[in-house]
Image (cartoon, rainbow, N blue to C red):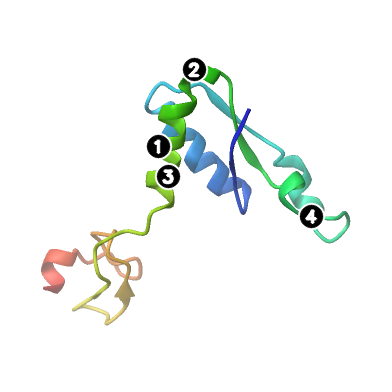
Amino acid sequence: MKIYSAANPPQAHIVCELLRSQNIECEVRGEGIFGLQGEVPFGEASEPHVWLLDLEEEQQARQLVAQFEQPHPEPPWRCSECGEINEGQFALCWQCGTSESVAE
């Protein structure tokens, strides 16, 4: 059963690994067609997706997917070292690697 449609293959793999980390059996399907964008019609039917292998795990899987889709509650922060704006869920500056605690 398709449990999650992703915008791209890496996003599908992130969700799949999140589910696997909770011992939910799943796999990524449909990623092979992603490279054909522009050559074939692309939409929900051809997006990479996470396929749930055990239907008894559907409720737990849906809860985890819903948590994944929630925006992170932490506010963005500015790095004191390089001035880069970083999303709140990151503890290190993506540009220079400085810790958020140093930035404060």
Mark 1 touches mark 4? (CB < 8 Å): no
Which residue: 15% across, 73% down?
Answer: 103
Name the N-terminal-most of marks 3 and 4.
Answer: 4
Of the two numbered discs 2 and 4 on the same chain, state the one appearing first in sequence: 4
Q: Residue furthest bottom?
A: 83
Q: First in sequence: mark 3 or mark 2?
A: 2
Mark 4 lies on residue: 42
- In three-dimensional space, the C-alpha distance between marks 1 and 2, rounded to whole angstroms, equals 13 Å
Left or right: 82 as drawn, with respect to 33 = left
Q: Is residue 96 above or below residue 12?
A: below
Label number found at residue 92: none
Per the image, the residue denoted by label 3 is: 66
The three-letter code of the residue at mark 4 reads: Phe
**Which callout, 1 or 4, points at the residue further toward the start of the chain?**
4
Q: Which residue is mark 1?
A: 63
- Report how far apart the C-alphas of labels 1 and 4 lie in the structure: 27 Å
Counting from the top left corner in percent of width and height, residue 70 is at 38, 54
Are circles 3 and 1 on residues that touch, CB within 8 Å? yes
Q: Which residue is mark 2?
A: 56
The type of residue carrying mark 2 is Glu
Q: Residues within 10 Å of mark 2 (few under 14, many from 20)?
A: few
Pointers 1 and 2 in contact (C-beta within 8 Å): no
* Mark whose residue sits in front, 2 or 4: 2
Q: Nearer the viewer, mark 1 or mark 4?
A: 1
For the point 29% across and 59% down, which residue is it? 89
**How far apart are the two marked residues, 3 and 1, measured between alpha carbons?**
5 Å
Q: Secondary structure at mark 2?
A: helix
Mark 2 near mark 4, Cβ–Cβ under 8 Å? no
